[in-house]
Image (tube, rainbow, N blue to C red):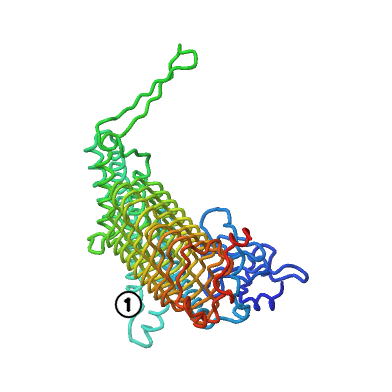
Amino acid sequence: MTHVAAERFGFRIEKKKKGRENGIPEGGTCRIFLYRIKSGALRAPPGAPALPLRSRAGTRRQTRVGAGPTPPRPRTAAAPPSTGGLPCFLSARYRKKPSSRSSLGENRAMQGTIRRIGTRGRKIPTSISRWSNRMALSTAVGLAVLGGVALAAAAEIVLILVFHPSRAGGSPIDVTKLALTVVGGVGGVVALVIAYRRQRDLEQGRFVERFSAAAAQLGAPDVAVRIAGVYAMVGVADESVSLRRQQCIDVLCGYLRLPYTPEVGANHQTKYVQTRKNADGVEENESTFEYRQNDKEVRQTIVRVIADHLHPDSQYSWSSSNFDFRTVNFEEARFSKAIFSGDSHFEGATFVGEAWFDHASFSHDATFMGATFLGNAHFDDVTFHESAWFTDANFCGNHTQFGGATFGYLAWFDHTTFCDSLALREATFSNMAWFEGAEFSNSWLNDTTFFGDAVFRGATFSGRTSFEKTTFSHSAVFDEAAFSGTTLFASSIFQGDTSFGGVTFSGATLFKHANFGESCVSFVAPQQWGPPAPVFDWDTDISLKPPNIKPSQWPPRAETSRLTS
């Protein structure tokens, strides 16, 4: 594939030297790398060549020829089955360079570049500090002496030129006095270096001593001692900065990641002995399970102090630190108004009780992949400045709230399960929203705005589903989705290409007063078209049907009826 063909399909070519691949050899295959997903050119038409995609984290994915968009994922997973491109998308779309969407992507790329430069700039003082810490004292003194000698020599030359006896009327002894003063200053610098190193070593030794004592308390069998160890570690973190504070936070998060069973975390049980007889009934095998007594109080204390330090009114803020909560068992997580400016990982975490993230802010990627919410989950008015990953998450509580949430970049809810009510009202998706294979039950997505592609391919909607007054500014994909309950698309707005190919409508579905715009909207080859059949504004007068609605012969003929005939 040549540059011309690639540009024809609307893909941006970036040449990156990687190994021996630099440029495109004659007669070879053009390897196009999308180092940043641009919302304007994510879907290739049928027949498009294979394109390896690269996410922001650098993960490469290889799509199949003619396949739909394959989402970049931060972990290895099989690519979902593709149904091909949308039935009637205009090929001209892929031959044009999107203007506003391209500028938006370029602005985001520029912001990412500026952010990376700023991050590297912030790391320079840390690197210098680490380099100076590793430097031996003799080396530091030697460098100080050499610098002082060089400064003295330079000062001597300047003094001779400025205070020359023939010019200023002075004597050579005056120049000598000034030179000795400079040499004395050099000695003072050397003494200052030695004193600084001595003070730094004392502080480091004090940190190690306090850190070790707090860690030992966290490992004590007595619950009171462990709680005291939590506050001791918090005190060490508050009086430390940068790397040392991160070490204290890592210890607290590591304690939460230890195996924990909520059933025995609140009682006084410390040991469980299980005895089993072998096959002949003669010998016995004994298994002993040890528990930390009353560990629930210790864990709740850790979660509470971390949440307090993430609050904007905290005296000592930990917001810029990183938090690794992977596989943690939260019995009650209250992170309301928390500010996560660093990395935050909640993969595989289990939230037994209520989970509160309302009005929270995530500056970096927020990863909740594979997380389980057994209680109600509150993400009202949360702000995700970067990507939000909820892939394979399970929301099993009675209520899941994302009302007023803002997704600043990519939103991944593929194969997510919402067991009960989902409130996604008035949410804003600034870029692509991926709900492929998700399961919804009694979901409210009304007054929500999708500025990027909205992909609901293969999703299942049961109970009552509302997309009323929802705006799809870009492409909307509902291919092979199943609507078994009452579904409302009333007054919704579709401004981009929309596809309901292979969809199943087995419940009451209303498209009354929906605005389908001028782009292609396809209902071709549904799996099931009622009963009851979906309701449109042109049901009583077919002449009111917009020309961009496909198929031309209305209503569409379901695949099941074709097989029967």
Q: Residue under label 1, please give it.
A: 174
- Looking at the image, residue 65 sits to the left or right of residue 388; the answer is right
Place of residue 492 in the rendered image (x, y in percent of width and height, measured from the top left): 41, 74
Q: Is residue 107 visible from the viewing direction of this image?
A: no
* Frontmost residue, 493 versus 406: 493
Residue drawn at (23%, 61%) of the image: 314
* Frontmost residue, 233 versus 102: 102
Residue drawn at (31%, 50%) of the image: 375
* Frontmost residue, 202 versus 364: 364
Q: Quadrant of the N terminus?
A: bottom right
Q: Is residue 533 visible from the viewing direction of this image?
A: yes
- Quadrant position of residue 257: top left
Q: Amino acid at mark 1?
A: Asp
Residue 35 against residue 393 in the figure, above or below = below
Place of residue 110 in the rendered image (x, y in percent of width and height, measured from the top left): 48, 76
Residue drawn at (48%, 66%) of the image: 533
- Looking at the image, residue 486 sits to the left or right of residue 353; the answer is right
Place of residue 335 in the rendered image (x, y in percent of width and height, measured from the top left): 29, 57
